[in-house]
């Protein structure tokens, strides 16, 4: 069954655009986002984010989408190939969590990834204490491959 089989009809992904830099900056620096992040535990400065964002926007190995519910932005999904296959990062805003938005967005992103990285393994790195993300990836068919003190590594074969 394709990943999109679980997609809710009012959820869509749209490619991120330059004007989305501030939106992603806001989501990145929210306390819930920082608490769940493996890479960023303190707020990121605008200049550092903008540099990262511009680099990602022009990188052919990166895909970033804004998740929209009923045409309103509610989160973001990024797939970035760092050399060993695409790695997924997802953020869904608190007001819509628990309503299937993350599962739908992940399914749509995996469908898109099949065209860019066919047959590759998609990697998800999750903090062990992030039960919601663990459930999300497990329900989407990701299998846990490794465990380290600070992260669980899940994989999904496209």
Image (tube, rainbow, N blue to C red):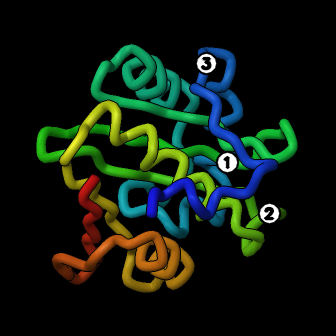
Q: Residues within 10 Å of mark 3 (few under 14, many from 20)?
A: few
Label 2 neighbour load within 10 Å: few <14, some 14-19, many 20+: few
Q: Is residue 67 left or right of residue 96?
A: left
Q: Which residue is mark 1?
A: 75
Disc 2 + disc 1, Cβ < 8 Å? yes
**In the figure, is residue 86 to the left or right of 4?**
left
**Point 61% across, 63% down: residue:** 6
Q: Secondary structure at mark 3?
A: loop
SS at badge 1 = strand
Q: Which mark is residue 17?
A: 3
Give the distance between the C-alpha atoms of the residues marked 2 and 3, in whole angstroms: 22 Å
Q: Quadrant of the N terminus?
A: bottom left
Identity of the residue furthest to the left in this view: 84
**Placement of 49 over or under 130, stated as above or below:** above
Of callouts 2 and 1, the N-terminal one: 1
- Please name the residue shown 31% across and 31% down the image: 116
**How far, Cα to Cα, is label 2 from label 1?**
9 Å
> Mark 2 sits on what residue?
96
Tag 3 and tag 1, C-beta contact below 8 Å: no
């Amino acid at each position: 069954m394709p990943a999109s089989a679980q997609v809710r009809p009012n959820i869509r992904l749209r490619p991120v655009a330059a004007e989305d830099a501030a939106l992603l900056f806001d989501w990145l620096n929210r306390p819930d986002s920082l608490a769940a992040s493996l890479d960023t535990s303190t707020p990121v400065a605008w200049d550092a984010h903008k540099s990262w964002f511009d680099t990602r926007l022009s990188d052919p190995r990166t895909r970033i989408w804004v998740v929209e519910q009923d045409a309103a932005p509610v989160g973001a999904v990024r797939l970035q190939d760092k050399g060993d296959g695409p790695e997924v990062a997802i953020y869904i805003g608190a007001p819509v969590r628990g309503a299937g938005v993350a599962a739908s967005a992940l399914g749509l992103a995996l469908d898109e990834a099949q065209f860019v990285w066919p047959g590759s393994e998609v990697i998800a790195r999750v903090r062990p204490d992030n039960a919601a993300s663990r459930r999300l990836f497990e329900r989407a068919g990701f299998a846990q491959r490794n465990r380290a003190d600070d992260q669980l590594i899940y994989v999904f074969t496209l």
